[in-house]
Image (cartoon, grey):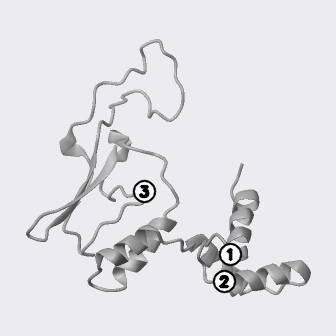
Amino acid sequence: TVNQLYADVSGNIGWVSAGFAPKRPNWDGTMPVSGDGRYECAGYHPHSIHPRGYNPTEGWFGTANQMNLPDDFDNESHKFGFEWADRSRFVRIAEALEAKQKHSPEEMLKLQTDFTSIAGRRLAKVLKTHVFDGDAAKAAEMLTSWHNRLDPDSGAAALVEIWFMRHLIPD
């Protein structure tokens, strides 16, 4: 399934998960199973049960591969998904959209290519509460004075990415 966002000329906005979501009566689709017929798909869920939203109180929808199934959606019965990306990108979109009421197309393009690192910002906040010495102190200073953008020429950005990939994300 994919996320579809839409708007009409009257100012209404909506979100719907669209696509073919298979019905799997005997399994959830996350692990391989025997091909002996016991785990065959039983068709697809009807579009009418796909999760959706319309004119949210926030005044906007954002989708960045984060878990966005509504609290009242019965994913146990309908099994639309189990794995989602870290919600950091969505958090950044929410920050930008909630910062003011109206946005220009240019601002939306800038947001589309925004390289702010929410994880790096969280890490810098934690580092500010600790005292380090030696090379660790230099690294902590680099990160706590960093502007939290993953710019290609930023040493702090490289340090954050290496640290996360090699030491903070499980293999």
Callout 3 touching callout 2 (CB < 8 Å): no
Callout 2 touching callout 1 (CB < 8 Å): yes
Determine crowd level at label 3: few under 14, some 14-19, many 20+ residues with C-alpha closer than 10 A.
some
Q: Residue at x 42, y 74 (%)?
A: 110
Of residues 19 and 51, which is closer to you in this image? 19
Amino acid of disc 1: Ser
Callout 1 touching callout 3 (CB < 8 Å): no
Q: Residue at x 14, y 67 (%)?
A: 12
Measure how far apart labels 2 and 1 are at the Cα level.
9 Å
**Outermost residue, left side:** 10
Measure how far apart labels 1 and 3 are at the Cα level.
30 Å
Determine crowd level at label 2: few under 14, some 14-19, many 20+ residues with C-alpha closer than 10 A.
some
Q: Residue at x 33, y 40 (%)?
A: 77
Estimate the x, y position of residue 105 in percent, counting from the top left. Answer: 30, 74
Residue 162 vertical placement versus 75 (above, below): below
Residue 22 vertical placement versus 8 (above, below): above
| Label placed on residue 154 | 1
**Which-is-in-front pick, marks 1 and 3?**
1
**Outermost residue, right side:** 134
Query: Which quadrant is home to the N terminus?
Result: top left
The local secondary structure at tag 3 comes to: loop
| Label placed on residue 146 | 2
Q: State the residue position of label 3.
A: 67
Amino acid of disc 3: Met
- In which quarter of the view is residue 28 placed? top left
- In which quarter of the view is residue 136 placed? bottom right
- Report whether 87 appears left or right of 137: left
Amino acid of disc 2: Trp
